[in-house]
Amino acid sequence: MDFFLLTIVKAAIIAFIFLTTLAYLQLLERKVIAHIQRRPGPYRVGPHGFLQPLADVIKLITKEDVVPPHVNRTFYILAPFFAVFFALIPICLIPFGPQVEIFGITTLMQLTDLPVGLVMVLAIGSIGIYGIALGGWASNNKYSLLGSLRSSAQMVSYELALTIAIATPLLLANTLSLQEITQAQSGFYFGFLPRWHIFQMPWPQIFSFIIFVIAAFAETNRLPFDMPEAENELIGGFHTEYSSMKFAGFFMAEYAGIVTICSIGTVLFLGGYNPLFPPELGSNFVPAFLFLGGAAILFFHALQAERWRDKITFPLFGVVFLGIAAIFAVPMLWPYLLPVFWFVMKAGVLIFLFIWVRGTLPRFRYDQLMAFAWKFLFPIALINLIITSGLVAVVS
Amino acid sequence: MDVFLFFLFAAIAVGCAVNLVLQTHPISSAISLIGVMVSLAALYLLLGAEFIAAAQVIVYAGAIMVLFIFVIMLLNTGSEETEPVNALSRFLGLPLLLVMVGLLSVVMLDVAPPSQEVRFGSFTGGGAADVGLLLFTKYLLPFEATSVLILIAILGAVVLAMREVD
Amino acid sequence: MLPFVQGGVPISWYLILSAILFAIGASGFLIRRNIITVFMCIELMLNAVNLSFVTFSYMWRQVDGHIITFFVMVVAAAEAAVGLAIILTIFKNRGTLQIDRINSLKN
């Protein structure tokens, strides 16, 4: 019974953090895009728009839930649930840390570690298409239908390149369990270069990583491949007819997809929870110093704040940062906090890359997108796979 | 727990399968079929076939059924027109179906006596490594043959789809 | 806890489930008139047979059944690709998916 209790506790923690992250990811995206475009972004709710997600959630819940009369009712209502459900599941397979002992219980810092974990993630991801496909079809609107047709074709095409890009680091790791893949990347070359798969001998997986990231943009329907919802061609794409919480469902599924695919990329290529440089060089103190630096910047700005409320909020956040820095400075908590910190940092960099690309690149044309997938990305991934498998066979 | 999970997923599978046959709109049928496939994948997990369970979801639910749904959405022909059913099949159909299930069940009970039981976790030979090892040693030739088959199928599909209609 | 927590499921139940699914698929194959639905019923029958393969594999503690299942999946994928291309062509030529209307060889 201990096992069930432990699983429920872990699931509750992960679900809480994950859902909060999704809400704040949307704020982060709006803020980053805004700063790329030289405007302040959400600014009114809370200090610097910090409570904006809360306001958004309240708005979405209290909005009228319209079901247009011309839709196929069953599938119209079912589609957002499909999308959210299958987008949220894969997070339970992601390893945030190694095996730890806490209050006398030994457990993995991950909900469950399957021997075929990665294949399961791919499997669940491949069902995720149905949410968008059904949503577009059930809306009974030609723009929605076109959006979802494009989306299904695009996701199927890029899934191929994505899967082959994923297969190459597996050849190096020699396992499908996400925990073991991460462990295969621990250690350092020459005492400082991490043995992550993008650096690992005999064939650094840098090409594979680039292909993975490009295909991930397409898989999550993000710019530059956001064909399904290209506003100036398709109004809103597959979610044109959706409002209120059903729209929020699709929205949440998109962000959950981003978080999942960035986590998978982190585990496969960037060494999961392994630190950037060895503890002998002081990697254990990085988080504490980072938050200390953040607090220092906040206090500095508080001294020369122009608005009176900044004089309150900046020191307040500074104190919070100092508190976090103090927590990270306790060596007793390192085994629990450091892996999570490194994992979140790496996944965060990838997520930032997603947003950055959205703020930078224009949209592809649909035929260019398909040609790019089949005539460029897929062959390159295949060549990379052949080279890697050859070298692995020669070396081992 | 084994019995409970078996009945849960068996019930979903049978329910979805019946729904597949009874629904008149192809999209409803396709979604029901996905339900059958996913619950079968869960049953495969109970039988210790981890890799096949994952492959079932990826290949069947994630690729083949996407193709079906894609075609259904593309053609968008709406519900099936019901045809008059002849009286013999209306009255004899269901009993004959039950007779068929009964006959098959008798054979199955003969093949596998009820004393043999499935316990989750007692057979762990279905991981990716075991399947892969057998696939690339004993079944190498059939494996290569299926890859050629896939190639031919792709070519065939492209040729069929490209040809202009006269 | 509940009484059925202990103990396993007889292997024959899995095989009977596979028989039931096969029978449902066969009946759907006979009574449905839309080509795509008929095609899906064939897939259902293939799935039912796959279940019995995996069950037999468990029964004899050998992986061979899994391999056969794998091959069935590959062949089903090839079949779906060609079959759906044929269905698309038929629809382009005849404008219908009802199998009773596609009978020009009869006349």
Image: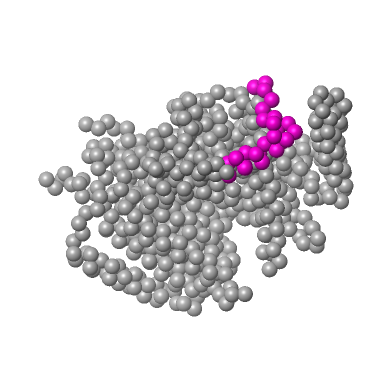
Magenta residues, as a range?
Answer: A37-61
Report if residue A240 is visible in the image. yes
Placement of C88 over or under B95, stated as above or below: above
Residue A250 shows in the view: no
Give the percent coordinates (x, y) of residue B70. Answer: 39, 41
Task: Reply yes or no: does residue A43 show up in magenta.
Answer: yes
- At a point 47% along the width and 48% down the height, the residue shown is A77
Q: In this view, does A4 lie to the left or right of B151?
A: right
Quadrant where the C terminus of chain C is found in the figure: top left
Q: Which of B21 and B106 is in front in this view?
A: B21
Foreground pick, B39 / B138: B39
Which residue is located at x 83 percent, y 42 percent? Answer: A324
Eyeballing the image, is B55 above or below B161? below
Of the pair A271 and A91, the residue shown nearer to us: A91
Residue found farthest to the top: A38
Q: Residue at x 85, y 45 (%)?
A: A327
* Residue A43, image x, y percentages: 70, 30
Q: Where is residue A267 in the image (x, y as percent from the top left)?
A: 67, 43
Where is residue C8? Give x, y as percent.
54, 73
**A360 left or right, relative to B105:** right
Q: Which residue lies furthest to the bottom in this view?
A: B115
Q: Residue at x 62, y 55 (%)?
A: A114
Magenta segment: does it hold A88? no
